[in-house]
């Protein structure tokens, strides 16, 4: 699947902030951010878009990473 069209679409689908979604989708290398691997996998699972950091991984490899390092939403991480 292609990259989400807008930061709003990514933010809503992945449950992340709009500014962070904008940074993840930015074409400007100075503004662009790279998500953590667990978040990149979560984005892939919720939107179907593979962030470039996942592009070389097979689905089986992603599944292993997902088991070892599951994504935890920010509000749950503090608990």
Image: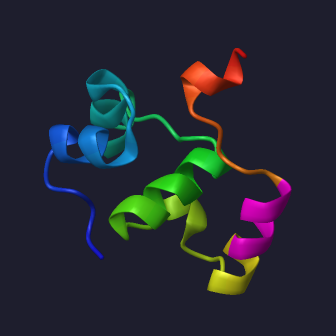
Pick the quarter of the image with the C terminus. top right
Please give the name of the residue rendered at 71% of the width and 74% of the height, measured from the top-left corner. Answer: 63
Is residue 33 shown in magenta? Answer: no
Q: Is residue 76 left or right of residue 65?
A: left
x and y, in percent, of residue 29 in the image: 38, 37
Q: Is residue 70 left or right of residue 50?
A: right
Please give the name of the residue rendered at 40% of the width and 60% of the height, measured from the top-left corner. Answer: 46
Q: Which residues are magenta?
A: 63-68
| Position above or below: 76 against 9 | above
x and y, in percent, of residue 52 in the image: 49, 62
| Position above or below: 22 against 19 | below
| Position above or below: 62 against 27 | below
Q: Relative to the observer, which residue lies in front, 21 or 69?
A: 69
x and y, in percent, of residue 12 in the image: 25, 41
Given the current orientation, which residue lies at the most extreme right position? 68
Does residue 11 appear in the picture of this structure?
yes
How many numbered discs, if any?
Answer: 0
Q: Relative to the observer, which residue lies in front, 62 or 70?
A: 70
Given the current orientation, which residue lies at the most extreme top position? 78
Q: Is residue 16 left or right of residue 54?
A: left
Pick the quarter of the image with the N terminus. bottom left
Q: Quadrant of residue 26?
A: top left
Please give the name of the residue rendered at 29% of the width and 38% of the height, measured from the top-left corner. Answer: 11
Does residue 51 appear in the picture of this structure?
no
Please give the name of the residue rendered at 46% of the width and 64% of the height, measured from the top-left corner. Answer: 44
x and y, in percent, of residue 65 in the image: 77, 63
Q: Quadrant of residue 27?
A: top left
Q: Relative to the observer, which residue lies in front, 78 or 35?
A: 78
Per the picture, the main secondary structure of the magenta-coloured stretch is helix
């Amino acid at each position: 699947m292609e990259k989400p069209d807008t930061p709003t679409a990514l933010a809503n689908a992945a449950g992340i902030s709009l500014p962070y979604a904008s940074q993840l989708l930015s074409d400007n290398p100075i503004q662009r951010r790279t998500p953590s691997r667990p978040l990149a996998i979560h984005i892939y699972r919720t939107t179907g878009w593979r962030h470039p950091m996942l592009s070389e991984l097979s689905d089986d490899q992603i599944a292993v990473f997902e088991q070892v390092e599951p994504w935890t939403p920010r509000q749950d991480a503090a608990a």
